[in-house]
Image (spheres, rainbow, N blue to C red):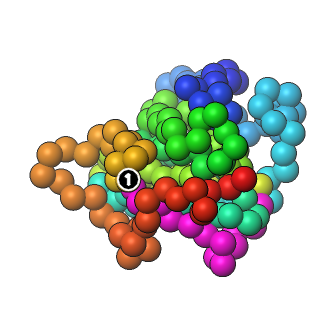
Amino acid sequence: MKFTRLAIPDLVLIEPQVFGDARGSFVMTWQDEAFRRGIADVTFIQDNQSRSRQWTLRGLHFQSRHTQGKLVRCSAGRVWDVAVDVRRSSSTFGNWAATELSEDNQHQLWIPPGFAHGFLVLSETADIQYKVTDRYDASSEQTIRWNDPAIGIDWPIPAGVQPVLSAKDTLGTPLDMSAALP
């Protein structure tokens, strides 16, 4: 596995080795020792999966308690995966980084605790799997507005297309220092 730190160094792109032949392919998507040695000494407690249709935009979500680290991958389709630093004390507070995750590139993104996360589905449908380091805590979940001009995420949405949002994501608020993490 190749580990590459992104513009925000706490975010790590993981490129696993894909073995392919006439039968198809094989990829090791997770190896505890390599992850602990190359990225972080964490314990994942839960695996989640979602399926979404094209132009669905999920996010930007984080929890103010039970902050979650996430290891995200796309096993079917293509997504534009985004992380925003919401740690008030960080020199990269309010900055974002993104990468395309797809079934073709098999890349994964490590998003440590202290980041909001979201993604846009670029293909007809997409399946996302992600491991998390802490439990879901609905009472502390925060949703940042996906198009907050103060953050300025460059979403690859074609002109004239409106992203498909949940009611919760439609009500997202601008990044607020009081809602951000210490």
Location of residue 21 in the rendering, given as x and y in whole percent from the top left corner: 54, 23
**Is any part of residue 69 visible from this angle?**
no
Q: Is residue 13 left or right of residue 169?
A: right
Looking at this view, name the residue that lies furthest to the left. Answer: 160
Q: Position of residue 25 (x, y in %)?
A: 56, 31
At a point 48% along the width and 44% down the height, the residue shown is 82
- Magenta range: 134-146
In this picture, is 44 found above or below 64? above
Q: Is residue 165 above or below residue 4?
A: below
Badge 1 marks a residue whose secondary structure is: loop
Rendered view: 7 above or below 133: above
Q: Is residue 98 visible?
A: yes
Q: Which of the 4 image quarters holds residue 100?
A: top left
Query: Which residue has dot 1 on it?
Result: 148
How many C-alpha atoms fall within 10 Å of the one at disc 1: few (<14), some, or many (≥20)? few
> Compared to 141, does 123 lie above or below?
above
Residue drawn at (50%, 39%), measured in percent from left and top?
96
Residue shown at 44% from the left, 50% from the top: 119
Percent x, y of residue 128: 52, 53
Which amino acid type is marked by label 1? Asp
